[in-house]
Amino acid sequence: MSKPQLHVVKRDGSVDDFNPAKIRTAVGRAYTANGREPQTQVVDHIVALVTRELQAKGELKVEEIQDMVEKELMAFNPFIAKKYIIYREWRNTERHKRTELKHTMDGIVQIETNDVNLSNANMSSHTPAGQMMTFASEVTKDYTRKYLLNPRYAQAHANGDIHIHDMDYYPTKTTTCLQYDLQDLFERGFHTKNGTVRTPQSIQSYATLATIIFQTNQNEQHGGQAIPAFDFFMAPGVRKSFWKHVGRNISFIAELGNTEGKELPNEKTICRTVREAEIALGNGKQELEAVSGIVAQLGLPVSEQQLQVALDKALAATERDTHQAMEGFIHNLNTMHSRGGNQVVFSSINYGTDTSPEGRMLIRCLLQATEEGLGQGEVPIFPIQIFKVKDGVNYSTHDIEAALANYEAAAKGEIAFDCPNFDLFLLACQTTARALFPNFVFLDTPFNADPDWKADDPKRYFHEVATMGCRTRVYENLNGPRTSIGRGNLSFTSINMPRLAILARQNAESRLPEATNERIQQEAKKLFLGSLREMATLVADQLYERYQYQQTAVARQFPFMMGNDVWKGGGALNPNDKVAEVLKQGTLGIGFIGGHNAMMALYGQSHAQSTEAWNTLHEAIGVLGQVVEEYKQRYGLNYSVLATPAEGLSGRFTKADQKRFGIIKGVNDRDYYVNSFHIDVKEPVSILDKIRLEAPFHAQTLGGHITYVELDGEAKKNVKVMVKIVRAMHDAGIGYGSINHPVDTCKRCGYKGVIYDKCPVCQSDQIARLRRITGYLTGSLESWNSAKQAEEHDRVKHR
């Protein structure tokens, strides 16, 4: 007579034959995990016990079997039982990961509207390329968690204690972002996979190659790219175009005047002579004299009056070329899909301090092209533009007061200013009132100021801080010159600050059940700061582990970035050399999110309402700074504190804490945590108060920061307000700031203005609502994840 078949009910409800070998394997691993050989009699006893139970019942659930094994092991040896429990939990976690990954993949396939598909507002996630990018991202994150991360860090990330950014790019060893020495690339030329690009000879070529450099290097990094001195770097292209037009005009006039049929130098020779003379851009007396000398040298039949016409025409043609080049530059950066998921390049440009005629013309044309917009007048999303405010160059109290006293005359150029580029500053304020860019970085804020900056230094931009549009700041350097050029961020990880505050408050209340609220707050603050230090130390260790992994990359993995010396020092490496020493120039960022929410957890008041809360947040960020300094000394690396530009993260942490703690009013009762140290987006503070309250945190977050104010109405109707706000930022010690205001466009008729429900012209409800998400713009709120949509909805207008 055959034995009755014994069955096990699996977790998905399916039934399988009982296999005692699986029990023997699991128990055996628990023993070997403790460094012991399995005890055969113990294992046999457990198998026999399970078998008898199965024979009595016919079938058991897999969890019931595991419970029996756990109970018996506990009786024999608690240490072995503990290892079995850990093994069992690990298996459950792995099953959960597979299930979660399958669910995520299904959402991508079905193009659901969810926060995985909307994690990056710059990506068209529902296109084929976007789906492939999202598939790759989710699978690679899973691979990183399982096989590359130390379990301690993987668990902290999974639990929501920290967030390791760009985990999908972890295996590739890429760095986050980089700021180019564009002048060096233009002067030397550069090579790509299929050939070499020589030095450009016109502003059109300069602009085209700038976009190509953006596009090419983007594929070797996972973050953004920036040009730190766009005006200085592009000005030679304007100058070369001017020389070309002057030479061609002289050649044409000489041919017309050559009535005697003399043999004259050809156009190429004349253009070369003009170029060698390095004539300054302009049509004044000095330029006329220089051109007259060339005409005399070459013996050309051209009168002084004709030369003046040649200069006038050359200057006008150069301005047209420059304007068209800037139009093309902006159009290309908004249409070239060079990243997976139909993403355009995440590009930023810094400018404002080149006082040369060429640099000034370039920025004037750039700002005009930005105001004019794209093909149908759409506001350009990229490049993110940052105007560098510098005392004595484009900013002074005297000039500000003169402009505000009579703004119309100032805007028309009817007032003589002290600063050579103050007119560009006013134009920048006008442009940001219409197009939300440029933002403003303040070079004379104490932590940005550089004592090596000299007004007569042709390369003074080397000593000017520049920033990525999203806010990342790379300037301080333990391993080389203090500069933004040729360096970038390596990686950053963010701390869930509200969670630490919630736990601190709960622990304080548990320890001091009879204490006053004030005493509990004191204890909670002490616990909070202590746990924050511990978490910052964990993050610093995790960043070092990632750095160690990144530095094992070889130069040929980044052929453009290293091969062309884009990341400074990379050009000296052979293809198989490791990039370790070069990467020491980069930064490692300890980020944080939810300062407001953390203070609400500790005090029940925000840091805009309570001086004590503000002081505690300031002290907390100071703790992060202390850890940064300790790890700088320990490893000789550029650790920094970063005010995290959270896009997807703001909702991830909140959901995790809602699940763990439930809904805590004022702390985690929304879909998002407030960014970094920012005043709550719903807090009805004035413009000046918001700037005043946030400015001191900029000095603490040298890895990157931003302060914005939110305006109501059409800012373009009152540019004076923009000037006043930038002045307030300058005077308060803001490092990097921006001004938000609604820019709405009707998709049907193209009407622009503040549109509420429907277009006032054609009554269409198809409205593109341009808003700033973290540091960059997006033209459709539907592309934002649920947390950032909720945050945008809550933003109050500052007055």
Image (cartoon, rainbow, N blue to C red):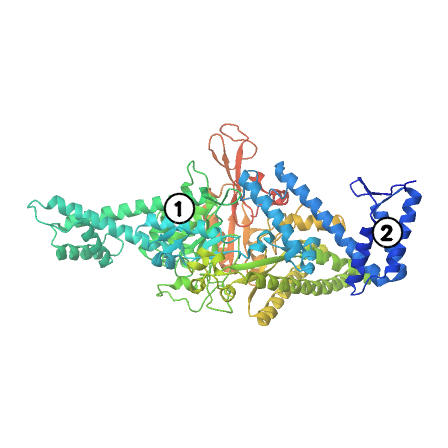
Q: Residue furthest bottom?
A: 633
Q: How many marks?
A: 2
Q: Is residue 782 above or below residue 461?
A: above
Q: Please identify, in this view, whether the residue under mark 2 or under mark 1 is nearer the observer.
A: 2
Kindly state the secondary structure of the residue where label 2 is placed.
Answer: helix
State the residue in front, 641 or 402. Answer: 641
Does label 2 or label 1 sit earlier along the sequence?
2
Inspect the image, locate mark 1, and give the three-letter code of the amino acid beneath it: Phe
Dot 2 crowding, Cα within 10 Å, few <14, some 14–19, many 20+: few
State the residue in front, 293 or 267. Answer: 267
Q: Residue furthest front?
A: 1
The percent position of residue 53, horizontal first and vertical second, equals 91, 47
The percent position of residue 122, horizontal first and vertical second, equals 53, 44
State the residue in front, 261 or 695. Answer: 261
Kindly state the secondary structure of the residue where label 1 is placed.
Answer: helix
* Quadrant, the N terminus: top right
CA distance for labels 2 and 1 = 66 Å
- The residue identified by callout 2 is 67
Instruction: Decide if residue 632 is on the left or right side of residue 421.
Output: right
Give the number of the disc on residue 329. 1
Q: Tell me which residue sits at (56%, 49%) in the image.
A: 774
Dot 1 crowding, Cα within 10 Å, few <14, some 14–19, many 20+: many
Q: Tell me which residue sits at (82%, 60%) in the image.
A: 82
In which quarter of the view is residue 538 placed?
Answer: bottom right
The percent position of residue 170, horizontal first and vertical second, equals 58, 55
Inspect the image, locate mark 2, and give the three-letter code of the amino acid beneath it: Asp
